[in-house]
Image: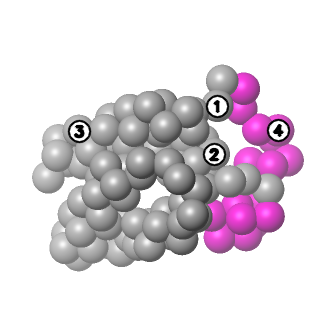
Amino acid sequence: MRTEIAEILIDIEAQLRQLGQWDKIPPSTEALASTEPFCVDTLTLPQWLQFIFLPTLYRMLEEDAALPDRCGIAPMAEEFYKGSGLAVANLVQALEQIDELLSQAS
């Protein structure tokens, strides 16, 4: 399962890059230190995925740490991108796969 999760994380990064949603410059330390869920007060969803979610899961996989037992990011992405005109179906599908894998592991 961990290999499958790693492959999907790579796909999420690729999708964000294809959509032009991958930032070259990281947000400020203050923005990354938000205590709000998904850093909604300081980051966009793509920034949260790039600078919080992906690095955290990669680190957990590397350290063989326990993974989250619940995940529900795909609905957030659907809402965030609603009406954007971007072709986000593949990104949402990858997020659904992560949601499912992490939620079934518990």
Label located before the other in sequence (1 or 4): 1
Residue 8: x %, y % from top left: 27, 44
Labels 1 and 3: the sequence-earlier one: 3
Spatial CA span between label 4 and label 3: 28 Å
Q: Amino acid at mark 2?
A: Gln
Q: Could you say where residue 86 lies in the image, as x and y percent from the top left?
A: 50, 48
Marks 1 and 2 sit apart, C-alpha to C-alpha, by 7 Å
Picture layout, residue 41 above or below residue 22: below
Q: CA distance from mark 3 to mark 2?
A: 20 Å
Q: Identify the magenta region.
A: 25-41
- SS at mark 3? helix
x 79%, y 64%: residue: 41
Task: Tell me the residue at 54%/66% (across/down).
Answer: 82
* Residue behind mark 4: 28
Q: Nearer the viewer, residue 47 or 83?
A: 83
Mark 1, mark 4: which one is toward the viewer? Answer: 1
- Give me the C-alpha separation between circle 2 and circle 4: 11 Å
Is the Cβ of the residue at disc 1 closer than 8 Å to that at disc 2? yes
- Between disc 1 and disc 3, the foreground one is 1
Q: Write down the residue under mark 3.
A: 7
**CA–CA distance in space, label 1 to label 4:** 12 Å
Q: Which residue is mark 1?
A: 23
Q: Secondary structure at mark 2?
A: helix
Say what amino acid the circle numbered 3 marks: Glu
Could you tell me which quadrant the C terminus lies in?
A: bottom left
Of the numbered discs 4 and 3, the one sitting upstream in the chain is: 3
Residue on which the image places disc 2: 47
Seen in the picture, residue 70 relative to 58 is either above or below; the reply is below
